[in-house]
Image (cartoon, rainbow, N blue to C red):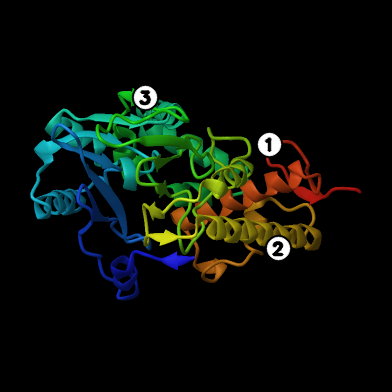
Amino acid sequence: MEITGTAQHEAWQARALPPVEQLRPDLWAVPVPIPHNPLRYVTVHVFALDGGGLGLLDAGWGSDDSWAALTGGLAAIGAGVHDVRGVLVTHLHFDHLGLAARLREATGAWVAMHPADASSVGRISAAGAAAFVASEVEFLVGLGADREDAVSDVGPPDRLESFTRMAVADRLLEDGEQADFPGWRMRAVHTPGHTPGHLCFAEERTRLFFSGDHVLPRISPNVSTTFAGSADPLGDYLASLAAVRELDPAEVLPAHEWRFRGLDSRVDALTAHHELRLTELLAAVRADPGSTPWQLAAHLTWSRPWDEYERRMRIFAVTETDAHLRVLASRGLVVGSGGPVPTWTLAVR
């Protein structure tokens, strides 16, 4: 894998925000910070459109600081929010969709997503924060959490209120459809896994591949089960990796970290990473049969000691463990006990 986003990479190593970059005469990368998050920023890609105006790929985290960074980035390229005509959203997470509603209100721009993620956003918005919290707590209890731990990790409804007010897409993009970016040939590539409706975009004129969170150069994106999501998100993700491996783009432009070349080698590394995780989890099931996903997560290797995990970090770890268990089950290697809180043991072979 070859690093092509050298300024982004250098900024990452310096723990700084990278600069606004002009990548082509008609394309820019604008970093928008993510508060209190190790990913630090999301890259909003800005496209000059034939006939005037701009198109954005992703919008940024929904906060005043992120809005200031986005508007400042547009000013740095000689433009403004009033120039935005439309926003393509790779997926429903708040660092990608959070500012879309504010952009639409300020400019009248359309917002486009895959139907699967658009449906999820609509469902969460209609249910409200209290119902969202209650559903997530019950889901974690079903993975083996003590109710008190689940309530503490999910947090109160007011902490998640902003997540229930995200923009509901007014345009839908299915796999293979062209986005409405005049002068560009942005083909939507449905890559479920990180979310059910995650979209990458293959620009067919320049051979640029905008990978969103699907393929990142340094880390594997979180692939987790959720209370209303796919039955096998990791299986979906591995299939989506295989589906993009042979695209052979000129450059990969992810939403985080830095640009690179060598999509095939990065896909191979991500696939190998998950196979290693599956092997480690299988060994944990063998050592502690009859364990829940909550219990098994504590036996896996994470970026820091398990007793330091809490709140969203612990939720992501446990739900990622559950996603890996489902793949092991689909391969006939483990079986769940059934019941309200399934436990897992090795399959009899």
Lateral position of residue 35 relative to residue 325, left or right: left
Q: CA distance from mark 2 to mark 3?
A: 40 Å
Seen from the viewer's position, the closer of residues 115 and 207 is 207
Give the image location of residue 70, x and y in percent: 18, 50
Amino acid marked by disc 3:
Ala
Seen from the viewer's position, the closer of residues 317 and 34 is 34
Label 1: which secondary element: loop
Quick one: label 1 or label 3, which is nearer the N terminus? 3
Label 2: which secondary element: helix
**Residue 88, numbered label:** none
Depth check, mark 1 against mark 3: the one in front is 3
Seen from the viewer's position, the closer of residues 232 and 264 is 264
Q: CA distance from mark 1 to mark 3?
A: 27 Å
Quick one: label 1 or label 2, which is nearer the N terminus? 2
Q: CA distance from mark 1 to mark 2?
A: 25 Å
Q: Quadrant of residue 279?
A: bottom right
Q: Residue at image x 74%, y 61%?
A: 284
Lateral position of residue 320 relative to residue 8, left or right: right
**Residue 280, numbered label:** 2
Depth check, mark 2 against mark 3: the one in front is 2
- Residue position marked by numbered label 1 in the rendering: 340
Q: Residue at image x 21%, y 51%?
A: 66
Give the image location of residue 156, x and y in percent: 37, 44
Label 2 crowd bin: few (<14), some (14–19), many (20+), radius 10 Å: some
Lateral position of residue 67 relative to residue 269, left or right: left
Label 3: which secondary element: helix
Q: Residue at image x 48%, y 40%?
A: 195
Amino acid marked by disc 2:
Glu
Q: Is residue 228 above or below residue 28?
A: above
- Residue position marked by numbered label 3 in the rendering: 126
